[in-house]
Image: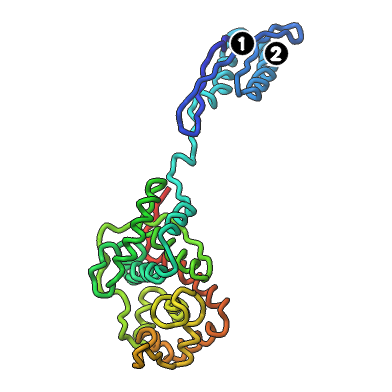
Amino acid sequence: MELTNIPYLASSSSSSFFYSSYSCCTCRRAGKLVKTVSATGGRCAADLARSQLFEQENEDTLSGPSSCHYRRREFASAILLPFLLPHVDISSATETYDISVIRSGVRKVLTKAKAAGVLRLVFHDAGTFDVSDKSGGMNGSIIYEVDRPENTGLNRSIKILGKAKAGIDKIQKVSWADLIAVAGAEAVALCGGPKIPVRLGRLDSSTADPAGKLPEETLDAAALKTSFSTKGFSTQEMVALSGAHTIGGKGFGSPVVFDNSYYKVLLEKKPQTSSSGMEAMVGLRTDWALTEDEECLRWIRIYAEDQARFFDDFRDTYIKLVDSGATWRTA
């Protein structure tokens, strides 16, 4: 059996191949001459071949020359097969997504003053989801919907994240849906809110979602509960998500601090006085509508008294929100 200078292929991290070769040597065991195999980088395989060839030759002595020749050839094929086949690097076969790259890109463009606008972008992209027909949801379609009245001002947040996307895409491609979901979580954390893990792999829509899916600012509590129900959210989850209004210019505590001030202010039920001396409404009509419903009011009281509970519930509901209606990449 001649195994001298048989090349084998091995894969590097870049999927290019390099060659190594086997060498043949002889040794004498139990009065018999036995050829053995060794390979650079394949010492274990060579040792196994050496031992098993010796045992096989003893067996082949009883079977005759033709059987010996056949078995040696079969054995050599089995030993060499792993070396002859190219190694497939699973990690390079599928595209990888490193969330730290996305977070780093977002942090370069995000400030506390811009946090509320970015978080609003999440709600307006994911808020189009409809449970009944599985339409809408977190799919990046908001970039086609900025001209709608309900999305006024969101073009600024899209431009901000567009700068982040340009940098991130040079390292790894990121969908708008994933970028917005991660950016919203970063906005919350930047302002002192809970850290929110975000799953990656959302695909972007190539068209706008149906119009008229977001809750209107004039709805009362009953209509709000119905609207959120069509998106798969309970009353508790609706109240928890509404706490996002704690940041921004709506008058609930500091505009750049994510805490439970939103609920405390709602319980006070006091209008804010503007610098001109005229009374101005804090927040939106829908914010105050929550205080007119007993079920909503119960959760407002709970979150006003327990910020940790609010943070936990907001985190969980945010994850549900950014997963709603998403279409995911498959490996």
Is the residue 233 above or below the residue 90 in the image?
below
Distance Cα–Cα, label 2 vs label 1: 20 Å
137 or 64: nearer the viewer? 137
Rendering coords of residue 64 (x, y %): 63, 9
Query: Quadrant of the image for the N terminus?
Result: top right
User: Would residue 91 appear left or right of 48 to someone viewing this image?
Assistant: left
In the rendered image of this protein, does residue 130 appear above or below residue 306? above
Q: Quadrant of residue 117?
A: bottom left
Q: Nearer the viewer, residue 58 or 63?
A: 58
196 lies left or right of 211: right
Amino acid type, label 1: Cys
Inspect this view and state whether residue 237 appears: no
Q: Can you see residue 257? A: yes
Q: Residue at 52% across / 21% down in the picture?
A: 8
Disc 2 versus disc 1: nearer the observer: 1
189 lies left or right of 113: right
Q: Which residue is mark 1?
A: 24
Task: Indicate the quadrant where residue 47 lies.
Answer: top right
Where is residue 307? Give x, y as percent. Answer: 56, 79
Based on the displayed image, in which of its 4 quarters is residue 26 positioned? Answer: top right
Display colour scheme: rainbow
